[in-house]
Image: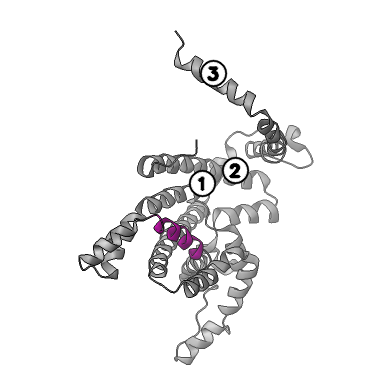
Amino acid sequence: MVNKQSVHRIKTKWNMKQNWPLYIMLIPAGILLLIFSYYPMYGVSIAFQDYQPVNGFFGSPFVGLKWFKYVFEMPDFKEILSNTLIMAIGKILIGTLFSIVFALLLNEIKNRRYKKTVQTIVYLPYFLSWVIIGGIFVDLLSADGLINQVINLFGHESIMFLGDNRYFRGTMILTDVWKSFGYGAIIYLAAMTGIDPQLYESARMDGANRLKQALHITLPGILPTIILLATLSIGNILNAGFDQILIMYNEVVYETGDIIDTFVYRVGLESAQFSLSTAVGLFKSVVSFIMIGISYTLAYKFADYRIF
């Protein structure tokens, strides 16, 4: 009697035999992945060494978890971790909310040309790098920038958005939301196209206005997509936006603006403390890996989403 494992083995062999050209096409991609993604991972070993470039990987003394203990005992580390979590969670929550609300409003526009024009304009910033957008915001938010000129017209003093710890986190969250909420809105709009139009017709016959239709049909219809994107975003909970903050922050706002990625950059490259910065980066990678596993588990449980 043939068991399930034997059947699966036979199917796998048959599949490989039938699709061998596709498997051969995967070989170059696999080689590149090994060379540029997996081989450099050997460098994380310097997190467990007193690494000296002169002595190299094999000549530097092994120190175990010394740098990890040093990192966790650093007075600044809690502050850096807190900044990272606050800005990452803020971007996820506010970005998701903005995207949903904007998608609901855009879905109510019946003029297709106007709707596409607005959609394209809002989506455009997503394609621009933070090098460009960061420079624009630095000019707009400076003491004599356009936004402070408007504030001055109403009789208020200028606000140092990028030079005051009270405003820096909020500025980073809002500028990131401005850049990316158009992309999220398109995903929700795509999900809305899958809602059965007969539900809207039935609701209109029952006297439901547009607001009630949006609340009781559209929003529940895209709820699985909202849950899916929200759970998958948990994996990026320690990614607070390296490019954005590196371009827009300065020494004055290190207290509220320094995140794990910028700390690793400053300490590792500018101060040449390679072992310390690698330990911090490895800590972040391990936590992110665990969070990605949790997010995929939740996505499978609540939205029936899985890659494999």
How far across and down, in percent of the image, does residue 87 sit?
47, 60
C-alpha gap between disc 3 and disc 1? 52 Å
Return the x and y of residue 111 as percentages of the image width and height. Answer: 44, 74
Q: Secondary structure at mark 1?
A: helix
Q: Residue at x 70, y 31 (%)?
A: 24
Decide if residue 162 is on the left or right side of residue 296: right
Residue labelled with disc 3:
9
What residue would you read off at disc 1?
73
Instruction: Reply above or below: 231 against 37.
Output: below
Which one is nearer the viewer's eye here, 208 or 59?
A: 208
Quadrant (top left/top right/bottom left/bottom right) for the N terminus: top left
What is the three-letter code of the residue carrying label 2? Answer: Ala
Amino acid at pointer 1: Glu
Residue type marked 3: Arg
Camera-near label (3 vs 1) is: 3
Q: Earlier in the sequence, mark 1 or mark 2?
A: 1
Q: Which residues are magenta?
A: 181-194
**Neighbours of disc 3 within 10 Å: few (<14), some (14-19), many (20+):** few
